[in-house]
Image (cartoon, rainbow, N blue to C red):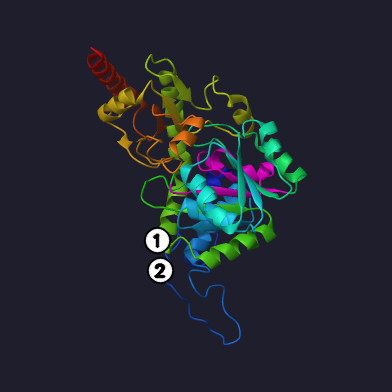
Amino acid sequence: MNENIETSLITASTRGDYEQKTGAVNVPIYLSSTFDQEHFDSFGPYDYSRSGNPTRDALEKTIAELEGGTRGFAFSSGIAAIASAFMILEAGDHIVVTSEVYGGTYRFVTQVLTKFGIEHTFADFSDLASVEAAIRPNTKVLYIETPANPLLGITDIEGVVAIAKANGALTFLDNTFMTPLYQRPLDLGVDVVLHSATKFLGGHSDIIAGLAVTKDVELGNRIYFMQNSFGAILGAQDSFSLIQGIKTLNARLTQSTASASKLAHYLEAHELVEEVHFPGLKSHPGHDIHAKQAKSAGAVLSFTLPNREITKAFVEHVQIPIFAVSLGGVESILSYPATMSHAAIPKEEREKRGITDGLLRFSVGLENIDDLIADFEQAFSKAKELTVVGNK
């Protein structure tokens, strides 16, 4: 039976033998580092948990099904998944990376891959001509984030895939903000889909996890080799927690997305807000392309205030959201990219990318949206009062 993804979120993890044998509605947590082998000459499907664990296996099969892939891989963090995917490259290879990229990815590309002789060029992935101009004869990967972090820049996925295929390169795509519920990059020709599963897939700010998915079997084998070689795997307990988080993804993200849209329109009309970055707004530069390739605008937005002083005052007076690194939790999370998610990028490079001292990123949680807007309103009022007093 062909299920809709909302159903598969619930059922995909329990398709293994354990469900058929016991009727368990939840995957067992196999807290075992090693597995007894019955035969001298042949081993069973599991021998050592770095190489494979039944609980992690259920998670990996789940994300592969949800993304429409053949192989899924669970890592100890999102950056571990990204790093392991990049490590299938060889010295002398070149990659083209979106200019608007998560700070941890920027750090890995600029400070780690270079030690292995892997070159890089940053390009504006909202402009296909810019991407094409960055291609070299040794280009092996085009790296996409869409929507990107933190300005929600949009990449035409099929456009970049076409450029990659014409030049014999692979495409990697960070799908953290959309999840497979809203965007399925493999269906659009992408080769490797990556997630910081810490975020919306986990959903409760309680685990650190990363995922990778491939459709091509041979490419999957190459990533598995790196996963097993580096050993940055997700443990059984966290794999179980992530499976449980995935089951509630539709309910959580549906509510958060609806609230994000209301909040974005409120912010767009506010006198203190200079700019709102949210693909659900018609004013967003990538609105039409995003609507073509994704089912929703998601639950993350960012907005720019006039200066650091007003931004600081707003943050210190807002009460409901937590002010923290990360996103995608049931609680709303307010972040300051300049010193949090993108602190690894030098100030000059941040400012080139539009990550100013007045930029805030907001991940909308499950609180009542009217309460959130009222909280924002009082914080803006306090920030405005303090600014007026300070200028006297």
Give coordinates of residue 337: x percent, y percent: 41, 36
- In the image as oriented, which residue stretches furthest toward the bottom? 40
Does residue 1 appear in the picture of this structure?
Answer: no
Give coordinates of residue 85: x percent, y percent: 58, 55
Q: Are marks 1 and 2 in contact (CB under 8 Å)?
A: yes
259 lies left or right of 385:
right
Give coordinates of residue 276: x percent, y percent: 46, 23
- In the image as oriented, which residue stretches furthest toward the right? 166
374 lies left or right of 47:
left
Foreground residue among 29 and 230: 230
Query: Which element type, helix, strand or loop, lies under badge 2?
Result: loop
Foreground residue among 271 and 115: 115
The three-letter code of the residue at mark 1 reads Gln
Give neighbour class at mark 1: few <14, some 14-19, many 20+ (Cα, 10 Å).
some
Mark before the other along the chain sequence, 1 or 2:
2
Q: Which residue is mark 1?
A: 237
Q: Marks 1 and 2, Cα distance to the nearest angstrom?
A: 7 Å
Query: Which element type, helix, strand or loop, lies under badge 1?
Result: helix
Question: What span is in magenta?
Answer: 169-198
Residue 204 lies, with reference to residue 300, above or below; the image says below
The three-letter code of the residue at mark 2 reads Leu
- In the image as oriented, which residue stretches furthest toward the top? 392
Residue at the spot x=37%, y=38% of the render? 339
Q: Is residue 102 magenta?
A: no
Which of the image's four quarters has the C terminus?
A: top left
Does residue 167 appear in the picture of this structure?
Answer: yes
Foreground residue among 224 and 123: 123
Q: Which residue is mark 2?
A: 31
Residue 25 sits in quarter:
bottom left
Foreground residue among 57 and 120: 120
Residue at the spot x=30%, y=25% of the render? 314
